[in-house]
Every structure is written in C-alpha cells, then in structure tokens.
Image (cartoon, rainbow, N blue to C red):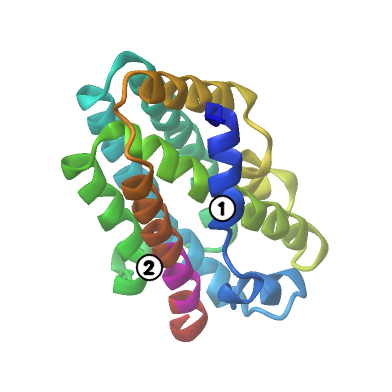
Amino acid sequence: MTRTARELLETTAGELAPDPGSNPLVPLIARGEADRAVLTALALEQRRVIPADRRAFLHLAERADPESAAYFTALAEGEALAAGHLETFAAACGADGARADAYVPLPGCQSYPAYVAWLALNANPSDVVLALTVNFSAWGGYCATIAKALRTRYGFGDEACAFFDFFAEPAPGLDRAAVQAVRTALEEGRLDEKRARRYADLLQTYEAMFWATLREHA
C-alpha cells in the first residue's frame, strides 16, 4: 500500500529520531546543572544560526515548486520572528553589545547552518522539505525542555524564554504546508525518499554536534 504524505513524514521522523543519549547538554540544563556561561554561548551561537537558516530557506523557496516554496517561506518568516525573541534571551544572558561582537563562534556549532546552506544550494527542495520536517521534531522537544528549565531552574521570565517557547509550540500551519508539499512531490515523482532520509540523518548528526560542542567548550 502506498503511504500517504503524513504517514511518510511521521514514519521517517520516528525512524530517525535521535537517541536520547545523543544530546549531552539539554539534560544538564533541565536539571539546572549547566553553567550560565553555557546559556550565553547558546544565545550567541543561535544569533548566527537563525539568520543563516532564514537566508537558506528563502533561497530554497526561490528554487522550489509552489507547494514547497510555501513551506520554506513560512520557515523563513518564523526565523524572522524568532530572531527578535532571541535578542531578548541574549540580553537576559548578558550576551549583547561588545560581548556579542567579540564572540568567536564554535565550528561544531556552525556545522548545522553550513549544511542547511549546502542543501539550499544543491539539494532537491522537495527532499529538503522531508529532511527538515524530520529534524524539527527533535529541535522542538529540546526547546520545550529548555524553556521549562529556564523558568524553574534559572529564574528567567517569560520574555526571555519566548525564543524557546516559539519553537516548542505546535505549528499546525507549517505542518499542513509540509504535508501538502510532500504530497505533491510524491504525486509528481519529485521526491527521492532515500536521499531525503540521508539529508535528515546528516541534519540530526550536525544538531547533535551542536549540543556536544557547547557542552565541551562553553
């Protein structure tokens, strides 16, 4: 039986879900055991990730079919909103002004946006829709955990937590856009599932590298 687009997305996300032990940092934050310097580094690394991903999504939208373009445009709009929330979190961490300007990003943290940029330039956009949707399910869970810990373990207020709240909240509109893009790609024979899974697996690997690098160096 041919799988529906939603079934494909859900099945792939389940099969490629990261091992619970692959993220060494978020559990420390959840317990309040991570130094505040780690939170500062997280904010400063994300200040480079968010605008880079936004530009990559816009480029993918330019290259894509209409349904996939709608998905990538929605992602780019989300990144623009998240950027404002991120500045509030960074300020709460003391990561603004001269400190932010002097910060040297960690290669292991910036490998993820570098790969997203590679996908934007080289990959079939329909394959990237599947790969990104699979990866975002893990990212949302991490953000939910961090948002809770920031409030209960570190004393951050709601405005400072809004960046993580934003990504932790369900996004039904984005979900529908992903399903429509994958459905159309399947119907038109433009989706290479094997290749998309390879992209998704690498995204998960680079995300794990992001957290492991912060844990090691911050």
Q: Which residues are the magenta region?
A: 207-212
x, y percent for residue 204: 46, 60
Q: Amino acid at mark 1?
A: Trp
On the picture, is 174 further left or further right than 60? Answer: right
Is disc 2 placed on a helix, strand or loop? helix
Task: Give the number of the mark in front: 2 or 1.
Answer: 1
| Residue closer to the observer: 181 or 28 | 181
- Could one spot residue 88 in this view of the protein? no
On the picture, is 76 further left or further right than 152? Answer: left
Q: Main secondary structure of the magenta part?
A: helix
Instruction: Please tell me which residue is depicted at 49% across the width and 27% down the height of the picture.
Output: 178
Residue furthest to the left in view is: 122
Residue furthest to the bottom in view is: 216
Up/down of 216 relative to 18, above or below: below
On the picture, is 28 further left or further right than 138? Answer: right
Task: Choose the circle earlier in sequence order: 2 or 1.
Answer: 2
Up/down of 180 relative to 78, above or below: above
Residue furthest to the right in view is: 152
According to the picture, the residue beneath numbered tag 2 turns out to be: 109
Is disc 1 placed on a helix, strand or loop? helix
Instruction: Please tell me which residue is depicted at 26% across the width and 56% down the height of the picture.
Output: 114
Residue furthest to the top in view is: 66
Up/down of 65 relative to 198, above or below: above
- Could one spot residue 11 in this view of the protein? yes
Q: Which mark is residue 139?
A: 1
x, y percent for residue 122: 17, 43
Q: Mark 1 Cα within 10 Å, few/some/many (few <14, many 20+)?
A: some
Residue 149 in which image quadrant: bottom right
Instruction: Please tell me which residue is depicted at 40% across the width and 18% down the height of the picture.
Output: 184
